[in-house]
Structure formats: C-alpha cells, structure tokens
Amino acid sequence: MTKEHEEIIINDLKDWKSIIKPYASPESKLAWKQIFNTILPFIGVFVAAAIVYDYSRLATLVISIIGGLFLTRVFIIQHDCGHQAFFPDRKKNDRTGFITSFLTCIPYKYWARSHNHHHAHQGQLDTRTIGDVNLLTVKEYEALSKSAKFKYRIYRSFPVMFIIGPAYYIFIHNRIPFITLKGWDKERKMLLLTNVYLVLFFAVVGLILCLPNFDLAYGFKKLAFIYVPILLTFVFTAIWFFYMQHQHNPNYKAWKKDWEYVLAAIKGSSYYKLPAILNYFTGNIGYHHLHHLAPKIPFYKLHKCSKENPVFQKHVSEITFWGSLKYAFYTLWDEENNRMVKFSQLKKIRIKS
C-alpha cells in the first residue's frame, strides 16, 4: 500500500467518528434479546446432549459440537462486555461478562484487558506480545539462529496454530497468569479466582448429572464427554475467525512512529464475508474492520452500521472462508513489500533483495 493510497483512505474516512456515533451506543432491549437467543439455546443444547448421552454417544458428540457453536456466540457477548459495549451500564456489562465466563472458561477481566491491549496496538510492530500471536518480520526471522528459526517454524505451523494451540489456549494459557507486567495485579488475582469458581461451578453441574443414582464417576464422565467437545469446538472456531482477520493481503503493519489508527483498523483488519448462519454464531465478528475502528459498537449493530455506510467497505480487504484458507500459512511480515508472506516465499524475497 503506497503513501498515496494511505492518504486517500484517511481522507475518505476523516468523518468516521461522527458516522460511527449513532451505532456506538448499546441498548438494553437489544442486549437482553441477545441473551435470550444465545444463552437459552446453549443451555437447551447442553440439556439435550445430557439426555441423549445414555442412548447414543455419537449423537451426543454431534449435539456438543452444535453447543460449541452457540458457546462461540456466548463468548462474543462476554467479549463485548469487556469492551463495555453490550449493555449501556458498566455494572451490567461486568456482571454479564463474569457470568458468561463460567460457560466459556475464559477469565473475564484478565482476557478483556489483554484484548483491549490488542485493540490499542493492533498492527504496531513495536508491540506484538499481549493479546496477539507472535509475528516476526522477515528481517527478524533471518537474524535468528538455526534453532530459533526451527522453533518459530514449529510455532507457526498449521498443527500448532490450529490444533494444539486452541487446546493449549483454553486449558493452559487462560488458567495461568503469564502476563507479569506492573498494574496487572487485579487481573491476575481474578484469573486465579476464576479457576476456583470454575471448579466449583462444574462440580455442581457434575453432581446434577449424577442424579438420580448419584453415581459420581458416571456424572463427571458424562460432563467431560459433553463439555470438552463444546469447549474445543468453541475455541477452534473463535481462534480461527479472530486470527484469520489479521493475516490477509493487502494488510497494514507499521512501527509506532508511523502507525495510523484508521489504517490499522481498515487495512490491518478484514471483512470476513460469511453466510448469515455463521454471522449469527460468530456474533458478526466478520465485520472486524468496523469492530477495530470502533469497539464500542455492539456486535448486534455491526451489520446495520456496515449496510448503511458503504464508505467502510470501500477500502477494506474482503475475504471469504475458502479464500482465507491460504492465510493460515502466512507466517512473516515482509516490511519491504508491506505484505504477509509464507516461509516458502523467502527464497524469492532473498533473490530480490
């Protein structure tokens, strides 16, 4: 992307704050509607899986996978609460975010702060540690030792990023407060407290599933069989959709001194064009460019904002599910050409330089 193109985008969107303003206002009525059409179906699916468990494990697994899709939408509610963008009231946002974290197993305050850090620094090459997947520039990668290059290649490989990584993320990364920066004491404590609350919450659920025979082994085995697939389906789905929307080409990344907020949102994030059913389960997260431009827009207003203001679609990178598959293999940022590249493209880059 040339400087001239950047200036065109910034000029076209110079009034973005006034355009966004009518949409960046949560509404209690609409928020409660999302609660009812998300959490109630999720609970219903969980109950259905519990009923079917004694008759067909395969059917139970299928129902659990559907439950995982609903849990993805539950997480979007938690996510918006973390942005204070779901309810108009802070207390309601925090209360709802905390309660939904029992279902998602994602610690509310700790995750919300790291995610807000991602929003504040998305696309900044100076800050790539909190709330982001580690990304190296081509020059940084070339400066590594052979062993360090091998480790980075393993880390950015498809199996690690999309199979091992999601399981690690839900069962380890969000269970241990790895962020040790000053000023994070409350968030670290809340993460550890959340772990305790989760043990108590699932202990109660497991005991309920023990009934009527009060067979502890049966109840907790049943809980694990139902809920582990739900969690894994949710985290695989969430990581895929959140991750893919920063890996596309053309893209935008810059050092802090040259970084522009609007460009980071519109060009550093994409519009993931999805079928209506996937927009439902992912809470319109496909409008990622809009979400990064104005995280105060509730997910239930993103579609309307996009539809009524085509200027936001003018410069964004539009991607589809099938088209995005190749982005899973983008692993480095090529500063010289302002693009994401694969390891397999390194030889061509070296020849040109």
Image: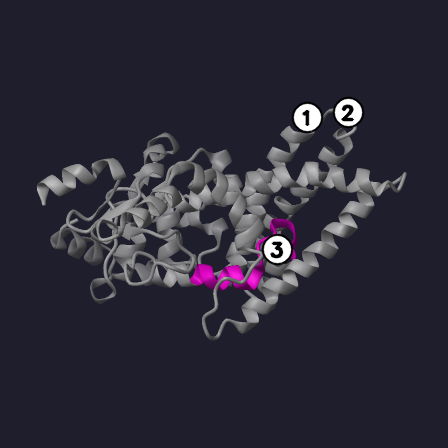
On the rendered structure, is 20 left or right of 171? Answer: left
- The image shows residue 28, relative to residue 169, as above or below, that is below
The kind of secondary structure element at disc 3 is: helix
In which quadrant will I find the C terminus?
top left
Q: What is the distance, in whole Å, between disc 3 and disc 2 at their CAs?
A: 30 Å
Mark 3 closeness class: few <14, some 14–19, many ≥20 residues within 10 Å: many
Task: Kindly indicate whether the residue at mark 2 contacts the one at mark 3 (C-beta within 8 angstroms).
Answer: no
At x 50%, y 71%, the residue is 184
Q: Can you identify the residue that label 2 sits on?
A: 55
Q: What element carries label 1?
A: helix
Q: Give the Cα separation between the discs numbered 1 and 2.
A: 8 Å
Q: Residue tagged by mark 1? A: 59
- On the image, the x and y values in percent for residue 177 come to 54, 63
Q: Can residue 235 be seen in this view?
A: yes
> Is 101 colored magenta in this rendering?
yes
The residue at 46%/61% (across/down) is 114
Q: Are marks 1 and 2 in contact (CB under 8 Å)?
A: yes
Q: Which of marks 1 and 3 is nearer the N terminus?
A: 1
**How far is the residue under mark 1 from the one under mark 3?**
26 Å
Where residue 13 sits, quadrant-wise, is bottom left
Three-letter amino acid code of the residue under disc 2: Tyr
State the SS at label 2: loop
What residue sits 68% from the left and 55% below the top? 198
Q: Is residue 160 left or right of residue 250?
A: right
Q: Which labelled disc corresponds to residue 101? A: 3
Kind of residue indicated by mark 1: Ala
Question: Start and end of the magenta stretch?
Answer: 99-116
Task: Name the outermost residue toward the left.
Answer: 352
Q: In this view, does 178 lie above or below 156?
A: below
Q: Can residue 237 be seen in this view?
A: no
Q: Marks 1 and 3: CB-CB under 8 Å?
A: no
| Label 1 environment density (alpha carbons within 10 Å; few <14, some 14–19, many ≥20) | some
